[in-house]
Image (cartoon, rainbow, N blue to C red):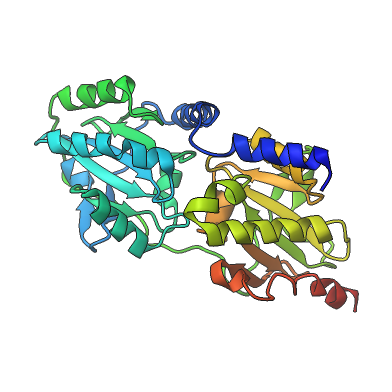
């Protein structure tokens, strides 16, 4: 590794080692981008399922209670730092506020969420967003992400920090007068399942890469397999302590892209999560490691949800016909699974 690569690597790891002043600014920026289209919007009446299996009907409390949702992850350092604030809000909540702790379900198992709840003594309902639909509804881009909803069901605040703006929004939401409620007509979150499975055809979508080019998910000529790599620019650095196995797999997947991404008998496409990441972060990642594979930012998480990717990294192979031929995620990436991917080129050449 030359001195330039060492310097770039150190710069990248430093920039993505959360939390830091730069990362906190990024968190605020991402939260503001999520807030812009949500401010003042009325949320649908929702029925959530807690990690204990209980139904939490938020539609039934509309008109009587304000709603406070905090999205978090067990591996998230600022989430851990802000947990005392969440617990304090819960202690002060009375008849006019419903508090819900929402684990984002990303690289977190139900067992890890339950252990975290016990460790922190969380007394409010805890929900795990296993399929990412709840996060999609509230434009999740960062952790923690705070959402305050008034008694009338309108979103008053979306933010990243547990600060005076959040406290003011909570006070404003709680001070709203009670309004007549027509009972719950709740939309149950997490009961549908439209994730792609083996043999399903990938959506006919065109994606914009960092270079500004448009690429199709699957080969439009139906001649080559496509390797979709689901990644994050911070996975190797930030997960090094909290999720070392995931960090190790992210490194191996990145090395595979660098080593084989220029070979043309198979199409490669890197899809980066929009969680805690911007176009600039992805560009720094590409430049630091000289990744030759086209990269695109899945800012709204729609591709991660469509392919059912809920941990980092993941690899999905699309056949030349555009159908899901194989997927690898978590422990299935260990052993020789990754190293066997380049043999797709041999198959494609036959």
User: Foreground residue, 187 or 92?
Assistant: 92
User: Foreground residue, 181 or 269?
Assistant: 269
User: Foreground residue, 18 or 319?
Assistant: 18
Residue at the image point whose x is 87% and y is 76% from the top = 346
Image-quadrant location for residue 178: top left
Residue 2 lies, in percent from the top left, at 84, 44
Q: Quadrant of the C terminus?
A: bottom right
Q: Is residue 150 left or right of residue 155?
A: left
Q: Residue furthest left?
A: 95
Q: Is residue 22 visible?
A: yes
Q: Is residue 234 left or right of residue 256?
A: left
Residue at the image point whose x is 65% and y is 65% from the top = 316
Residue 118 lies, in percent from the top left, at 24, 56
Disc count in the image?
0
Q: Is residue 239 above or below residue 34?
A: below
Residue 295 lies, in percent from the top left, at 73, 47
Q: Is residue 288 above or below residue 32?
A: below
Residue at the image point whose x is 83% and y is 65% from the top = 266
Residue 27 lies, in percent from the top left, at 49, 31
Image-quadrant location for residue 274: top right
Q: Is residue 209 visible?
A: no
Q: Is residue 105 above or below residue 38?
A: below
Q: Is residue 130 left or right of residue 152?
A: right
Q: Is residue 218 left or right of residue 52?
A: right
User: Foreground residue, 102 or 286?
Assistant: 286
């Amino acid at each position: 590794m030359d001195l330039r690569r060492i310097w770039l690597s150190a710069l990248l790891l430093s920039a993505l080692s959360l939390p830091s002043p730069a990362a906190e600014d990024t968190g605020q920026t991402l939260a503001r981008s999520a807030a812009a289209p949500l401010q003042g919007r009325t949320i649908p009446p929702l029925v959530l399922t807690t990690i204990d299996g209980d139904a939490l009907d938020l539609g039934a409390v509309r008109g009587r209670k304000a709603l406070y949702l905090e999205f978090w992850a067990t591996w998230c350092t600022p989430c851990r730092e802000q947990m005392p604030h969440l617990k304090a809000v819960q202690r002060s909540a009375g008849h006019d506020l419903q508090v819900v702790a929402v684990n984002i379900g990303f690289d977190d198992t139900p067992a890890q969420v339950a252990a975290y709840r016990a460790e922190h003594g969380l007394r409010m309902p805890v929900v795990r967003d296993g399929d990412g639909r709840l996060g999609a509804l509230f434009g999740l881009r960062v952790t923690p992400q705070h959402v305050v909803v008034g008694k009338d069901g309108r979103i008053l605040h979306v933010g990243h920090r547990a600060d005076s703006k959040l406290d003011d929004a909570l006070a404003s939401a709680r001070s709203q007068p009670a309004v007549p409620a027509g009972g719950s007509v709740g939309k149950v979150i997490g009961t549908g399942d439209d994730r792609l499975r083996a043999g399903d055809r990938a959506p006919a979508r065109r994606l914009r890469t960092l270079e500004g080019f448009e690429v199709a998910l699957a080969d439009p000529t139906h001649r080559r397999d496509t390797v979709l790599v689901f990644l994050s620019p911070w996975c190797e650095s930030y997960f090094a302590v909290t999720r070392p196995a995931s960090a190790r797999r992210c490194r191996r997947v990145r090395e595979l892209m660098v080593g084989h991404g220029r070979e043309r008998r198979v199409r490669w496409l890197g899809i980066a999560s929009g969680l805690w990441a911007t176009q600039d972060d992805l560009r720094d990642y590409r430049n630091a490691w000289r990744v030759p594979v086209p990269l695109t930012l899945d800012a709204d998480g729609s591709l991660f949800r469509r392919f059912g990717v809920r941990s980092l990294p993941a690899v999905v192979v699309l056949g030349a016909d555009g159908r899901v031929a194989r997927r690898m995620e978590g422990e299935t990436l260990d052993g020789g699974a990754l190293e066997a991917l380049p043999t797709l080129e041999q198959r494609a050449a036959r």
